[in-house]
Amino acid sequence: IFRNGWYQENLFMSLPHAISSGKWYTSAADGRIAHGARDDMAAAIAAGLASGSKESHIYTLTGPQAYTTNEIAALVSEVTGKPLEVIQLPDEALTEGVKSACLPEDFARIIVSF
């Protein structure tokens, strides 16, 4: 079993708007995510499947280092030269905000869970 963590490419869905507005809304607080590249996870899965092992294993695939939203925002600000304020919201408020972008509630809850 291969369990992929959160893809770093997912940041490209939220960061363009956050960079343009200067505000990144989240409910992650000080939670950390070790984002990983999809290609890296795919390569790890391919290697695992090609290993020929007959034993049962569970692999959790993540990136090399876990970052908070504030740490990612600081990196983005450094690279872009634009300030990026992280605004913490309760899960319910963030879910409502995501739904206001015409996304279904179930999908909004999934997005907020990360």
Image: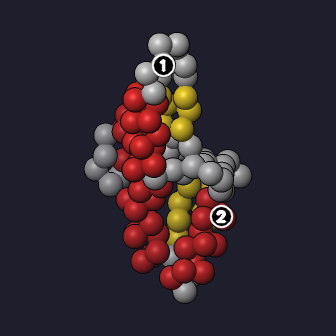
Amino acid beneath label 1: Ser
On the image, the x and y values in percent for residue 79 come to 54, 80
Q: Is residue 17 above or below residue 106?
A: below
SS class of the residue under badge 1?
A: loop
At 51% from the left and 50% from the top, the residue drawn is 36
Q: Residues within 10 Å of mark 2 (few under 14, many from 20)?
A: many
Which residue matches tag 2?
70
Outermost residue, left direction? 102
At 52% from the left and 14% from the top, the residue drawn is 56
On the image, the x and y values in percent for residue 20 come to 42, 77
Q: First in sequence: mark 2 or mark 1?
A: 1
At 51% from the left and 82% from the top, the residue drawn is 80
Which residue matches tag 1?
53
State left or right for residue 90 relative to residue 48.
right
On the image, the x and y values in percent for residue 86 come to 61, 66
Q: How is the image coloured?
A: secondary structure
